[in-house]
Image (spheres, grey):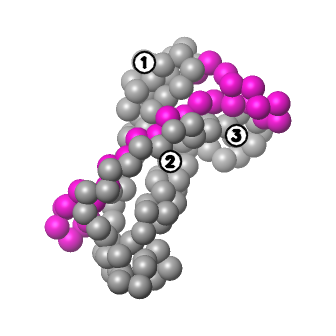
């Protein structure tokens, strides 16, 4: 989108993070944490760390494909990995990882991950 770019037509890093957020929301739904379920259970995946490698710039008019997957699971947190690819040439533009923890609201209490996650998603 035009608002995702700077005056030179290059996508800025904040736009990539927003795209990752969208992909992560869809991935969470596949993990059984769609928005309605989270609102009902009051358990939310909370980002605790983001790592991003910007390999090549996207430019105004580029169509990007974003893939996300569960990358690593421990007792208290999990990592999701993301890759952004320009559709026209298949170039990998951005790779990123995010660490997340499950938190029960409103008390903000961190929770252990469900025991079956390592088998289901690991």
Which one is earlier in the sequence, the residue at label 1 or at label 3? 3
For mark 3, what is the residue? 38
Which numbered dot is residue 94? none
Find the magenta span and give its range. 85-113
Q: Which mark is residue 24?
A: 2
For residue 5, which quarter of the picture?
A: bottom left
- Measuring 31% from the left and 70% from the top, which residue is drawn there? 58
Q: Whole-percent x and y of residue 106?
A: 82, 35
- In the picture, measured across the screen, residue 76 lies left or right of residue 8, that is right
- Overall secondary structure of the magenta stretch? strand
Labelled disc at residue 119: 1
- Tell which residue pokes out farthest to the left in this image: 89
Q: Is residue 108 left or right of residue 122?
A: right
Residue located 50% across and 79% down the image: 3
Mark 3 residue crowding within 10 angstroms, few (<14) / some (14–19) / many (20+)? some
Q: Give the CA separation, mark 3 to mark 2.
A: 14 Å
- Res. 120 in view: no
3D distance between C-alphas at marks 1 and 3: 22 Å
Query: Residue 7: where, in percent of width, then height?
Result: 41, 85
């Amino acid at each position: 989108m035009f608002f995702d770019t700077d005056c030179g037509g290059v996508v800025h890093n904040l736009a990539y993070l927003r795209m990752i957020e969208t992909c992560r929301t869809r991935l969470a739904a596949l993990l059984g944490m769609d928005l309605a379920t989270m609102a009902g259970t009051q358990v939310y995946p909370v980002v605790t760390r983001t790592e991003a490698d910007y390999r090549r710039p996207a430019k105004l008019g580029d169509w990007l494909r974003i893939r996300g997957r569960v990358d690593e699971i421990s007792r208290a947190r999990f990592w999701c990995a993301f890759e952004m690819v320009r559709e026209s040439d298949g170039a990998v533009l951005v790779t990123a990882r995010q660490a997340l923890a499950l938190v029960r609201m409103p008390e903000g209490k961190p929770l252990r991950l469900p025991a079956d996650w390592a088998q289901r998603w690991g």
